[in-house]
Amino acid sequence: MEVSVLLLLALTAGFLLFLVSQSQPKTHDHFPPGPHPLPFLGNLLQMDRRGLLNSFMQLQEKYGDVFTVHLGLRPVVMLCGTDTIREALVDQAEAFSGRGTVAVLDPIVQGYGVIFANGERWKTLRRFSLATMRDSGMGKQSVEERIKEEAQCLVIELKKYKGAPLNPTFFFQSIAENIICSIVFGERFDYKDHQFLHLLDLIYQTFSLMSSLSSQVFELFSAVLKYFPGTHKQISKNLQEILDYIGQNVEKHRATLDPSASRDFIDAYLLRMEKEKSSHHTEFHHQNLMMSVLSLFFAGTETTSTTLRYGFLLMLKYPHVAEKVQKEIDQVIGSHRLPTLDDRTKMPYTDAVIHEIQRFSDLAPIGLPHRVTQNTLFRGYLLPKNTEVYPILSSALHDPRYFEQPDTFNPEHFLDANGALKKSEAFLPFSTGKRVCLGEGIARNELFLFFTTILQNFSLDSPVAPEHIDLTPNNNGAGKIPPPYQIHFLSR
Protein backbone atom coordinates (compact mmCIF):
# COMPACT_ATOMS: atom_id res chain seq x y z
CA MET A 1 0.00 0.00 0.00
CA GLU A 2 2.80 2.41 0.95
CA VAL A 3 4.58 1.81 -2.38
CA SER A 4 1.37 2.58 -4.28
CA VAL A 5 0.96 5.85 -2.38
CA LEU A 6 4.57 6.77 -3.06
CA LEU A 7 4.14 6.08 -6.76
CA LEU A 8 0.93 8.14 -6.87
CA LEU A 9 2.66 11.04 -5.14
CA ALA A 10 5.63 10.78 -7.49
CA LEU A 11 3.43 10.67 -10.59
CA THR A 12 1.34 13.63 -9.40
CA ALA A 13 4.42 15.67 -8.54
CA GLY A 14 5.98 14.69 -11.84
CA PHE A 15 2.98 15.87 -13.82
CA LEU A 16 2.91 19.19 -11.99
CA LEU A 17 6.60 19.76 -12.53
CA PHE A 18 6.21 18.83 -16.16
CA LEU A 19 3.51 21.45 -16.62
CA VAL A 20 5.69 24.05 -14.93
CA SER A 21 9.03 23.35 -16.54
CA GLN A 22 8.40 21.19 -19.63
CA SER A 23 11.84 19.89 -18.80
CA GLN A 24 13.30 16.91 -20.62
CA PRO A 25 16.18 14.94 -19.08
CA LYS A 26 19.21 15.65 -21.18
CA THR A 27 21.71 12.87 -21.65
CA HIS A 28 25.18 13.70 -22.90
CA ASP A 29 25.68 12.74 -26.55
CA HIS A 30 28.40 10.29 -25.63
CA PHE A 31 26.61 8.55 -22.75
CA PRO A 32 26.01 4.79 -23.12
CA PRO A 33 22.69 3.79 -24.72
CA GLY A 34 19.57 3.19 -22.67
CA PRO A 35 15.79 3.49 -22.70
CA HIS A 36 14.39 6.87 -23.67
CA PRO A 37 13.47 8.88 -20.54
CA LEU A 38 10.25 10.79 -19.96
CA PRO A 39 10.18 14.29 -18.46
CA PHE A 40 10.81 14.09 -14.69
CA LEU A 41 9.79 10.41 -14.58
CA GLY A 42 12.95 9.27 -16.29
CA ASN A 43 12.75 5.53 -16.94
CA LEU A 44 10.04 4.78 -14.37
CA LEU A 45 7.91 3.02 -16.99
CA GLN A 46 10.76 0.61 -17.74
CA MET A 47 11.19 -0.35 -14.09
CA ASP A 48 10.11 -3.82 -12.99
CA ARG A 49 7.71 -3.99 -10.03
CA ARG A 50 10.02 -6.52 -8.40
CA GLY A 51 12.66 -3.85 -7.91
CA LEU A 52 15.66 -2.09 -9.40
CA LEU A 53 17.87 -5.19 -9.72
CA ASN A 54 15.37 -7.04 -11.91
CA SER A 55 14.91 -3.89 -13.97
CA PHE A 56 18.65 -3.51 -14.55
CA MET A 57 19.09 -7.18 -15.46
CA GLN A 58 16.34 -6.90 -18.08
CA LEU A 59 17.88 -3.74 -19.52
CA GLN A 60 21.28 -5.44 -19.68
CA GLU A 61 19.80 -8.06 -22.02
CA LYS A 62 18.65 -5.29 -24.37
CA TYR A 63 21.46 -2.72 -24.15
CA GLY A 64 24.53 -4.75 -23.19
CA ASP A 65 26.93 -4.52 -20.25
CA VAL A 66 27.17 -0.70 -20.18
CA PHE A 67 23.99 1.37 -20.38
CA THR A 68 22.32 4.47 -18.99
CA VAL A 69 19.19 4.57 -16.83
CA HIS A 70 17.47 7.77 -15.73
CA LEU A 71 16.54 7.50 -12.07
CA GLY A 72 14.12 10.38 -12.07
CA LEU A 73 15.97 13.29 -13.64
CA ARG A 74 19.51 12.03 -13.15
CA PRO A 75 21.29 9.75 -15.63
CA VAL A 76 23.12 6.82 -13.98
CA VAL A 77 25.49 4.52 -15.85
CA MET A 78 25.15 0.80 -15.11
CA LEU A 79 28.14 -1.54 -15.29
CA CYS A 80 27.28 -5.23 -15.68
CA GLY A 81 29.45 -8.32 -15.91
CA THR A 82 32.80 -9.19 -14.34
CA ASP A 83 35.02 -7.83 -17.09
CA THR A 84 33.15 -4.52 -17.29
CA ILE A 85 33.21 -3.92 -13.53
CA ARG A 86 36.90 -4.78 -13.25
CA GLU A 87 37.80 -2.65 -16.25
CA ALA A 88 36.18 0.34 -14.54
CA LEU A 89 36.93 -0.15 -10.84
CA VAL A 90 40.40 -1.70 -11.20
CA ASP A 91 41.88 -0.63 -14.55
CA GLN A 92 40.54 2.93 -14.18
CA ALA A 93 40.44 2.85 -10.40
CA GLU A 94 41.14 6.52 -9.70
CA ALA A 95 38.57 7.80 -12.19
CA PHE A 96 35.82 5.57 -10.72
CA SER A 97 36.78 6.07 -7.05
CA GLY A 98 34.13 8.68 -6.21
CA ARG A 99 31.10 7.79 -4.10
CA GLY A 100 27.56 8.42 -5.27
CA THR A 101 24.64 9.10 -2.96
CA VAL A 102 22.07 6.72 -1.47
CA ALA A 103 18.93 8.84 -1.23
CA VAL A 104 17.48 7.32 1.96
CA LEU A 105 20.81 7.78 3.80
CA ASP A 106 21.93 11.12 2.45
CA PRO A 107 19.92 13.34 4.86
CA ILE A 108 21.87 11.77 7.72
CA VAL A 109 25.36 11.05 6.33
CA GLN A 110 25.62 14.16 4.08
CA GLY A 111 28.91 13.05 2.57
CA TYR A 112 30.69 12.51 5.90
CA GLY A 113 32.31 9.34 7.24
CA VAL A 114 34.65 6.82 5.69
CA ILE A 115 32.11 5.10 3.39
CA PHE A 116 30.26 8.08 1.94
CA ALA A 117 33.01 10.71 1.81
CA ASN A 118 34.72 11.83 -1.38
CA GLY A 119 38.04 13.37 -2.40
CA GLU A 120 40.74 14.01 0.17
CA ARG A 121 38.26 13.52 3.02
CA TRP A 122 37.66 9.94 1.91
CA LYS A 123 41.35 9.20 1.32
CA THR A 124 42.33 10.55 4.73
CA LEU A 125 39.58 8.68 6.61
CA ARG A 126 40.18 5.43 4.75
CA ARG A 127 43.93 5.46 5.45
CA PHE A 128 43.25 6.14 9.12
CA SER A 129 40.52 3.49 9.40
CA LEU A 130 42.56 0.76 7.73
CA ALA A 131 45.58 1.48 9.91
CA THR A 132 43.51 1.66 13.11
CA MET A 133 41.57 -1.54 12.43
CA ARG A 134 44.74 -3.59 12.11
CA ASP A 135 45.54 -5.70 15.15
CA SER A 136 48.34 -3.40 16.28
CA GLY A 137 45.90 -0.56 16.77
CA MET A 138 43.27 -2.52 18.65
CA GLY A 139 44.90 -3.31 21.98
CA LYS A 140 46.49 -6.52 23.20
CA GLN A 141 43.88 -8.95 21.90
CA SER A 142 43.93 -9.67 18.17
CA VAL A 143 40.78 -9.63 16.07
CA GLU A 144 41.16 -13.39 15.59
CA GLU A 145 41.15 -13.94 19.35
CA ARG A 146 38.06 -11.77 19.70
CA ILE A 147 36.21 -13.75 17.03
CA LYS A 148 37.18 -17.08 18.62
CA GLU A 149 36.05 -15.85 22.02
CA GLU A 150 32.71 -14.67 20.59
CA ALA A 151 32.24 -17.98 18.78
CA GLN A 152 32.61 -19.83 22.07
CA CYS A 153 30.07 -17.54 23.72
CA LEU A 154 27.66 -18.43 20.92
CA VAL A 155 28.25 -22.17 21.34
CA ILE A 156 27.49 -21.91 25.07
CA GLU A 157 24.30 -19.98 24.34
CA LEU A 158 23.08 -22.37 21.63
CA LYS A 159 23.66 -25.42 23.84
CA LYS A 160 21.14 -24.00 26.32
CA TYR A 161 18.39 -24.65 23.76
CA LYS A 162 19.16 -28.39 23.73
CA GLY A 163 18.24 -28.76 20.08
CA ALA A 164 14.93 -26.90 20.25
CA PRO A 165 14.02 -25.05 17.03
CA LEU A 166 15.00 -21.39 16.92
CA ASN A 167 15.29 -18.48 14.52
CA PRO A 168 19.06 -17.83 14.27
CA THR A 169 18.74 -14.18 13.18
CA PHE A 170 19.29 -12.71 16.64
CA PHE A 171 22.33 -14.88 17.41
CA PHE A 172 24.09 -14.16 14.12
CA GLN A 173 23.42 -10.45 14.58
CA SER A 174 24.76 -10.58 18.13
CA ILE A 175 28.08 -12.20 17.30
CA ALA A 176 28.74 -9.89 14.35
CA GLU A 177 27.70 -6.81 16.34
CA ASN A 178 29.93 -7.78 19.26
CA ILE A 179 32.99 -7.98 17.03
CA ILE A 180 32.41 -4.49 15.65
CA CYS A 181 31.59 -3.22 19.16
CA SER A 182 34.88 -4.63 20.45
CA ILE A 183 36.75 -2.84 17.66
CA VAL A 184 34.90 0.47 17.91
CA PHE A 185 33.92 0.65 21.61
CA GLY A 186 36.48 -1.73 23.11
CA GLU A 187 33.82 -3.96 24.70
CA ARG A 188 31.37 -6.74 23.96
CA PHE A 189 27.81 -7.02 25.29
CA ASP A 190 25.84 -9.80 26.91
CA TYR A 191 23.18 -11.23 24.59
CA LYS A 192 20.50 -10.16 27.08
CA ASP A 193 21.70 -6.55 27.47
CA HIS A 194 18.61 -4.41 26.74
CA GLN A 195 20.49 -1.54 25.11
CA PHE A 196 22.41 -4.01 22.95
CA LEU A 197 19.18 -5.72 21.92
CA HIS A 198 17.59 -2.40 20.98
CA LEU A 199 20.64 -1.46 18.91
CA LEU A 200 20.45 -4.78 17.06
CA ASP A 201 16.78 -4.24 16.35
CA LEU A 202 17.39 -0.74 14.97
CA ILE A 203 20.14 -1.98 12.64
CA TYR A 204 18.06 -4.94 11.44
CA GLN A 205 14.98 -2.76 10.87
CA THR A 206 16.97 -0.15 8.98
CA PHE A 207 18.72 -2.63 6.70
CA SER A 208 15.36 -4.24 5.90
CA LEU A 209 13.77 -0.87 5.19
CA MET A 210 16.68 0.13 2.94
CA SER A 211 16.13 -3.05 0.93
CA SER A 212 12.38 -2.48 0.53
CA LEU A 213 10.63 -1.52 -2.69
CA SER A 214 9.51 1.80 -1.20
CA SER A 215 13.15 2.77 -0.61
CA GLN A 216 13.91 1.93 -4.23
CA VAL A 217 11.04 4.17 -5.37
CA PHE A 218 12.42 6.90 -3.11
CA GLU A 219 15.77 6.58 -4.87
CA LEU A 220 14.06 7.65 -8.11
CA PHE A 221 12.10 10.61 -6.75
CA SER A 222 13.76 11.67 -3.50
CA ALA A 223 13.68 15.38 -4.43
CA VAL A 224 9.88 15.31 -4.14
CA LEU A 225 9.13 12.35 -1.87
CA LYS A 226 11.38 13.63 0.92
CA TYR A 227 8.58 16.08 1.82
CA PHE A 228 6.06 13.27 2.38
CA PRO A 229 5.77 10.50 5.00
CA GLY A 230 7.34 7.17 4.12
CA THR A 231 10.02 4.59 4.78
CA HIS A 232 12.77 7.21 4.41
CA LYS A 233 11.48 9.04 7.50
CA GLN A 234 11.70 5.89 9.61
CA ILE A 235 15.22 5.18 8.34
CA SER A 236 16.34 8.67 9.35
CA LYS A 237 14.71 8.28 12.76
CA ASN A 238 16.43 4.93 13.34
CA LEU A 239 19.81 6.25 12.26
CA GLN A 240 19.50 9.26 14.51
CA GLU A 241 18.77 6.99 17.47
CA ILE A 242 21.87 4.93 16.68
CA LEU A 243 23.89 8.15 16.39
CA ASP A 244 22.62 9.25 19.81
CA TYR A 245 23.95 5.99 21.26
CA ILE A 246 27.29 6.43 19.48
CA GLY A 247 27.48 10.03 20.75
CA GLN A 248 27.05 8.87 24.35
CA ASN A 249 29.91 6.39 23.89
CA VAL A 250 32.13 9.04 22.35
CA GLU A 251 31.61 11.28 25.39
CA LYS A 252 32.44 8.39 27.76
CA HIS A 253 35.62 7.77 25.79
CA ARG A 254 36.52 11.46 25.85
CA ALA A 255 36.14 11.55 29.65
CA THR A 256 38.36 8.49 30.20
CA LEU A 257 40.87 8.98 27.36
CA ASP A 258 44.45 7.94 28.10
CA PRO A 259 46.87 9.29 25.48
CA SER A 260 49.34 6.48 26.25
CA ALA A 261 46.87 3.60 25.80
CA SER A 262 44.41 3.62 22.91
CA ARG A 263 41.65 1.11 23.66
CA ASP A 264 39.72 1.11 20.37
CA PHE A 265 38.77 2.96 17.20
CA ILE A 266 37.09 5.86 19.04
CA ASP A 267 40.13 6.42 21.26
CA ALA A 268 42.45 6.41 18.26
CA TYR A 269 40.23 8.93 16.48
CA LEU A 270 39.93 11.25 19.51
CA LEU A 271 43.71 11.25 19.89
CA ARG A 272 44.09 12.17 16.23
CA MET A 273 41.49 14.94 16.69
CA GLU A 274 43.53 16.35 19.56
CA LYS A 275 46.72 16.17 17.51
CA GLU A 276 45.17 18.10 14.62
CA LYS A 277 42.93 20.48 16.57
CA SER A 278 44.91 23.53 15.44
CA SER A 279 44.51 22.67 11.75
CA HIS A 280 41.70 24.49 9.97
CA HIS A 281 41.57 21.85 7.22
CA THR A 282 41.57 18.68 9.32
CA GLU A 283 39.08 15.93 8.53
CA PHE A 284 39.34 14.65 12.09
CA HIS A 285 36.31 16.33 13.57
CA HIS A 286 33.20 15.17 15.40
CA GLN A 287 30.92 14.74 12.38
CA ASN A 288 33.35 12.50 10.51
CA LEU A 289 33.84 10.44 13.66
CA MET A 290 30.11 9.92 14.15
CA MET A 291 29.45 8.98 10.52
CA SER A 292 32.50 6.72 10.32
CA VAL A 293 31.39 4.76 13.39
CA LEU A 294 27.83 4.57 12.02
CA SER A 295 29.20 3.26 8.72
CA LEU A 296 31.35 0.65 10.48
CA PHE A 297 28.34 -0.49 12.50
CA PHE A 298 26.34 -1.29 9.40
CA ALA A 299 29.23 -2.67 7.37
CA GLY A 300 30.35 -4.79 10.32
CA THR A 301 27.01 -6.13 11.54
CA GLU A 302 24.38 -6.74 8.91
CA THR A 303 26.72 -8.01 6.18
CA THR A 304 28.27 -10.83 8.23
CA SER A 305 25.08 -11.75 10.07
CA THR A 306 22.98 -11.88 6.90
CA THR A 307 25.61 -14.00 5.11
CA LEU A 308 25.57 -16.46 8.03
CA ARG A 309 21.77 -16.58 7.98
CA TYR A 310 21.78 -17.40 4.29
CA GLY A 311 24.66 -19.83 4.82
CA PHE A 312 22.91 -21.98 7.39
CA LEU A 313 19.66 -21.90 5.42
CA LEU A 314 21.67 -23.31 2.51
CA MET A 315 23.16 -25.96 4.79
CA LEU A 316 19.60 -27.04 5.71
CA LYS A 317 18.65 -27.08 2.03
CA TYR A 318 21.76 -29.08 1.07
CA PRO A 319 22.60 -31.27 4.10
CA HIS A 320 25.18 -33.29 2.15
CA VAL A 321 27.28 -30.12 1.88
CA ALA A 322 27.16 -29.55 5.65
CA GLU A 323 28.17 -33.19 6.19
CA LYS A 324 31.21 -32.81 3.92
CA VAL A 325 32.24 -29.65 5.76
CA GLN A 326 31.97 -31.46 9.09
CA LYS A 327 34.05 -34.33 7.76
CA GLU A 328 36.80 -31.87 6.81
CA ILE A 329 36.52 -30.17 10.21
CA ASP A 330 36.91 -33.54 11.96
CA GLN A 331 39.96 -34.41 9.86
CA VAL A 332 41.80 -31.09 10.15
CA ILE A 333 40.68 -29.63 13.50
CA GLY A 334 39.04 -32.43 15.45
CA SER A 335 36.77 -31.80 18.41
CA HIS A 336 39.23 -30.83 21.15
CA ARG A 337 40.59 -27.48 19.99
CA LEU A 338 39.19 -24.27 18.55
CA PRO A 339 39.34 -23.56 14.82
CA THR A 340 42.02 -21.03 13.88
CA LEU A 341 42.64 -18.97 10.76
CA ASP A 342 45.68 -21.15 10.03
CA ASP A 343 43.27 -24.04 9.42
CA ARG A 344 41.70 -22.31 6.41
CA THR A 345 44.44 -23.23 3.93
CA LYS A 346 44.08 -26.90 4.92
CA MET A 347 40.31 -26.88 4.42
CA PRO A 348 39.67 -26.13 0.73
CA TYR A 349 36.16 -27.61 0.66
CA THR A 350 34.99 -25.55 3.64
CA ASP A 351 36.57 -22.44 2.14
CA ALA A 352 34.86 -23.16 -1.19
CA VAL A 353 31.50 -23.56 0.57
CA ILE A 354 31.88 -20.18 2.31
CA HIS A 355 32.83 -18.57 -1.02
CA GLU A 356 29.77 -20.11 -2.65
CA ILE A 357 27.52 -18.95 0.19
CA GLN A 358 28.75 -15.40 -0.39
CA ARG A 359 28.33 -15.70 -4.15
CA PHE A 360 24.88 -17.27 -4.03
CA SER A 361 23.48 -15.05 -1.26
CA ASP A 362 24.54 -11.99 -3.29
CA LEU A 363 24.13 -9.73 -0.28
CA ALA A 364 24.65 -6.33 -1.96
CA PRO A 365 23.43 -7.02 -5.51
CA ILE A 366 23.55 -3.44 -6.79
CA GLY A 367 26.59 -2.38 -4.79
CA LEU A 368 27.10 1.10 -3.45
CA PRO A 369 26.99 3.81 -6.12
CA HIS A 370 30.23 5.24 -7.48
CA ARG A 371 30.90 8.61 -9.11
CA VAL A 372 33.54 9.43 -11.70
CA THR A 373 36.03 11.95 -10.38
CA GLN A 374 36.89 13.45 -13.79
CA ASN A 375 35.69 13.40 -17.40
CA THR A 376 36.25 9.75 -18.21
CA LEU A 377 36.40 7.83 -21.47
CA PHE A 378 35.09 4.32 -20.92
CA ARG A 379 34.47 1.83 -23.72
CA GLY A 380 34.01 4.64 -26.22
CA TYR A 381 31.60 6.65 -24.03
CA LEU A 382 32.48 9.97 -22.44
CA LEU A 383 31.24 10.14 -18.86
CA PRO A 384 31.28 13.73 -17.55
CA LYS A 385 32.81 14.37 -14.13
CA ASN A 386 30.45 13.46 -11.25
CA THR A 387 28.39 11.00 -13.35
CA GLU A 388 26.94 8.37 -11.01
CA VAL A 389 27.86 4.76 -11.76
CA TYR A 390 26.31 1.58 -10.38
CA PRO A 391 28.57 -1.51 -10.48
CA ILE A 392 25.95 -4.29 -10.49
CA LEU A 393 27.83 -6.83 -8.35
CA SER A 394 25.10 -9.43 -8.84
CA SER A 395 25.93 -9.55 -12.55
CA ALA A 396 29.48 -10.64 -11.66
CA LEU A 397 28.48 -13.12 -8.97
CA HIS A 398 26.06 -14.71 -11.47
CA ASP A 399 28.27 -14.29 -14.53
CA PRO A 400 27.81 -17.40 -16.73
CA ARG A 401 31.24 -16.79 -18.26
CA TYR A 402 32.80 -17.58 -14.88
CA PHE A 403 30.28 -19.86 -13.16
CA GLU A 404 28.94 -22.91 -14.94
CA GLN A 405 25.67 -22.92 -13.01
CA PRO A 406 25.31 -19.30 -11.84
CA ASP A 407 21.81 -19.69 -10.39
CA THR A 408 22.57 -22.93 -8.55
CA PHE A 409 24.31 -23.34 -5.19
CA ASN A 410 27.38 -25.43 -5.98
CA PRO A 411 30.68 -25.26 -4.01
CA GLU A 412 32.41 -26.86 -7.02
CA HIS A 413 32.41 -23.35 -8.53
CA PHE A 414 35.42 -22.68 -6.28
CA LEU A 415 37.25 -26.01 -6.52
CA ASP A 416 39.67 -27.13 -9.23
CA ALA A 417 40.06 -30.66 -10.61
CA ASN A 418 42.37 -31.56 -7.71
CA GLY A 419 39.98 -30.33 -5.01
CA ALA A 420 42.04 -27.22 -4.24
CA LEU A 421 40.45 -23.81 -3.75
CA LYS A 422 40.02 -22.04 -7.09
CA LYS A 423 39.94 -18.26 -7.15
CA SER A 424 37.61 -16.44 -9.50
CA GLU A 425 37.83 -12.94 -10.97
CA ALA A 426 34.04 -12.80 -10.70
CA PHE A 427 34.01 -13.23 -6.91
CA LEU A 428 33.18 -9.64 -5.95
CA PRO A 429 30.92 -9.73 -2.85
CA PHE A 430 32.99 -6.92 -1.31
CA SER A 431 33.25 -5.00 -4.62
CA THR A 432 36.77 -4.21 -5.88
CA GLY A 433 39.13 -1.35 -6.64
CA LYS A 434 39.82 1.63 -4.41
CA ARG A 435 36.37 1.46 -2.81
CA VAL A 436 36.54 -2.22 -1.90
CA CYS A 437 34.97 -2.87 1.52
CA LEU A 438 37.54 -1.85 4.15
CA GLY A 439 36.29 -4.59 6.50
CA GLU A 440 36.75 -7.39 3.96
CA GLY A 441 39.55 -9.08 5.89
CA ILE A 442 37.65 -9.05 9.19
CA ALA A 443 34.46 -10.28 7.51
CA ARG A 444 36.27 -13.20 5.82
CA ASN A 445 37.82 -14.17 9.17
CA GLU A 446 34.47 -13.95 10.94
CA LEU A 447 32.72 -16.12 8.36
CA PHE A 448 35.37 -18.84 8.53
CA LEU A 449 35.70 -18.97 12.32
CA PHE A 450 31.98 -18.68 13.10
CA PHE A 451 30.98 -21.17 10.39
CA THR A 452 33.54 -23.82 11.37
CA THR A 453 33.01 -23.41 15.13
CA ILE A 454 29.25 -23.89 14.81
CA LEU A 455 29.58 -26.95 12.58
CA GLN A 456 32.31 -28.37 14.80
CA ASN A 457 29.92 -28.33 17.73
CA PHE A 458 26.49 -28.89 16.17
CA SER A 459 24.68 -30.96 13.60
CA LEU A 460 21.85 -29.17 11.83
CA ASP A 461 18.24 -30.10 11.35
CA SER A 462 15.17 -28.33 9.99
CA PRO A 463 11.46 -28.64 10.82
CA VAL A 464 10.99 -28.40 7.03
CA ALA A 465 12.16 -31.06 4.58
CA PRO A 466 15.10 -29.86 2.43
CA GLU A 467 13.09 -30.03 -0.79
CA HIS A 468 10.49 -27.66 0.70
CA ILE A 469 12.96 -25.03 1.92
CA ASP A 470 12.46 -21.79 -0.01
CA LEU A 471 15.56 -19.67 -0.65
CA THR A 472 13.68 -16.71 -2.15
CA PRO A 473 14.75 -13.49 -0.38
CA ASN A 474 12.18 -11.41 1.50
CA ASN A 475 13.60 -8.18 0.10
CA ASN A 476 15.90 -7.61 -2.84
CA GLY A 477 16.99 -3.98 -2.97
CA ALA A 478 20.11 -2.43 -1.43
CA GLY A 479 20.54 -5.82 0.21
CA LYS A 480 19.08 -9.31 -0.06
CA ILE A 481 17.21 -10.35 3.07
CA PRO A 482 16.85 -14.13 3.46
CA PRO A 483 13.46 -15.50 4.49
CA PRO A 484 12.99 -16.29 8.19
CA TYR A 485 13.43 -19.91 9.16
CA GLN A 486 13.76 -22.27 12.12
CA ILE A 487 16.81 -24.44 12.75
CA HIS A 488 17.76 -27.13 15.28
CA PHE A 489 21.36 -26.96 16.58
CA LEU A 490 22.00 -30.49 17.85
CA SER A 491 25.12 -31.04 19.94
CA ARG A 492 27.56 -33.39 18.25
Image: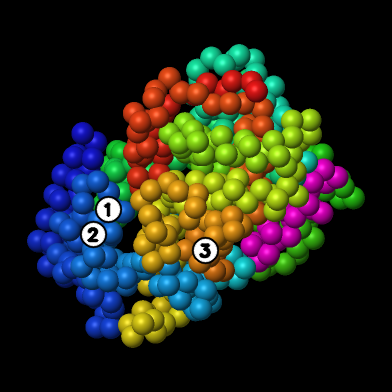
Query: Does residue 146 belong to the magenta stretch?
Result: no
Residue underneath mark 1? 54
Query: Does residue 138 belong to the magenta stretch?
Result: yes
Give the mark nearest the N terminus, 1 or 3: 1
Categorize mark 2 by other alpha carbons within 10 Å: few (<14), some (14-19), many (20+).
some
Give coordinates of residue 479: x percent, y percent: 42, 46
For residue 424, the mark is 3
**Mark 3: secondary structure:** loop
Asked if one can make out residue 250 in the rendered structure from this viewpoint, the answer is no
Q: Amino acid at mark 1?
A: Asn
**Left or right relative to 435: residue 35:** left
Q: CA distance from mark 2 to mark 1?
A: 6 Å
**Mark 1: secondary structure:** helix
Q: Nearer the viewer, residue 168 or 185?
A: 168
Q: Is residue 324 above or below residue 168?
A: below
* Residue contact at pointers 2 and 1, CB within 8 angstroms: yes
Q: What residue is at 54 percent from the left and 69 percent from the top?
A: 433
Q: Most extreme residue toward the left, as rendered?
A: 19
Q: Residue 82 is drawn in which quadrant?
A: bottom left
Give coordinates of residue 395: x percent, y percent: 37, 60
For residue 19, the mark is none
**Which range is magenta?**
124-142
Q: Nearer the viewer, residue 122 or 168?
A: 168
Q: Amino acid at mark 2?
A: Gln
Q: CA distance from mark 1 to mark 3?
A: 24 Å
Residue underneath mark 2? 58
**Left or right relative to 11: residue 328:** right
Q: What residue is at 51 percent from the left and 29 percent from the top?
A: 169
Asked if one can make out residue 399 in the rendered structure from this viewpoint, the answer is yes
